Image: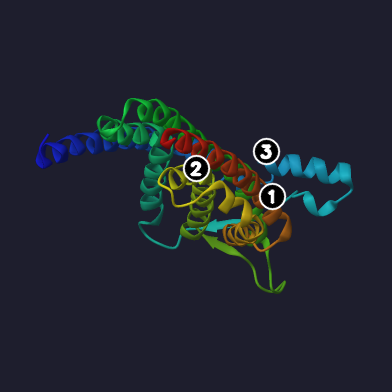
Amino acid sequence: MTFWDHLEELRWHILRSLVAVILIAAIAFMNRSLVFDFIILGPSTSDFITNRVLCMAGQWLNVEALCIKDMKLQIINISMSGQFLTHMYISMVAGFILAFPYVLWEIWRFVRPAMHENERKYSTGGVIISSTLFLLGVLFSYFLIVPLTVNFLGTYQVSERVFNQISLTSYISTVVSVTFAVGVAFELPILVYFLTKIGIITPDFLKKNRKYMYVILLIVAAIITPPDVFSQILVVIPLIGLYELSIAVSKRVYKKSFEAIS
């Protein structure tokens, strides 16, 4: 294939991906009540499943601070077109998240002809694993990190005389950014796989610098979570687990690469 043939092929893969995202976004747009009242605004209420579980845990452990009985979070819109544009934006975000496995599959289909037979076999599993890790990160963030973030930042007061009225755009920005950040962070084993494959890192490098990486992961957890120790611990534990998994992945890839050279 010529350079222009490759571009034409890429154009169709991108077009199909966009169609998938737009179709799912359209479905999300038509289900406004489900998307906003139940999903997006869910973590801002005391009836949200995570808040109810934390409240039950607080009662069992006799830690009253864990129980969120009444959030009293007021979300307001201060722009004429704010609610409509937010509706459009969230629909596209939902479209991208739900279509992510298909988009990744289209990318794989484009690069597949350039792969060797054994690379195709392993890359197919990589697409599935990458999609699964991203969706697990999104779910983990939505059901655990987002409620804690909303509760802490939405109810924090420097003085009882200062009341919180959260703008809709600010709330949406916080929910989306935290969710995506954790979803991307869960892709760490995939990143390590490719970096090991091209020879940039080795398992020994990851083991040798483990203590430094733990500090970096703690900093990442502090950035993508509200400034309280409990939330940071909840995020850093799975990140450390993913790092240890990445070492195992790197070790396996490095071993196979060494055997292939031998």
Between circles 2 and 1, the one closer to the viewer is 1
Q: Which residue is mark 2?
A: 36
Q: Earlier in the sequence, mark 2 or mark 1?
A: 2
Q: Quadrant of the N terminus?
A: top left
- Where in the figure is residue 27, as x and y percent of width and height? 37, 32
In the picture, residue 115 is in which quadrant?
Answer: top left
Q: Nearer the viewer, residue 181 or 207?
A: 207
Q: Earlier in the sequence, mark 2 or mark 3?
A: 2
Identity of the residue furthest to the right in this view: 62
Q: Amino acid at mark 2?
A: Phe
Q: Residue at x 65, y 45 (%)?
A: 238
State left or right for residue 189 relative to residue 103: right
Q: Nearer the viewer, residue 35 or 187?
A: 187
Q: Amino acid at mark 1?
A: Leu
Disc sitting over residue 247 in the figure: none
State left or right for residue 84 relative to residue 222: left
Is any atom of residue 178 visible in this view? yes
Q: Nearer the viewer, residue 70 or 128?
A: 128
- Where in the figure is residue 161, as x and y percent of width and height? 69, 74
Q: Which residue is mark 1?
A: 234
Position of 190 relative to 86 (above/below): above
Question: Label 3 vs label 1: CA separation?
Answer: 17 Å
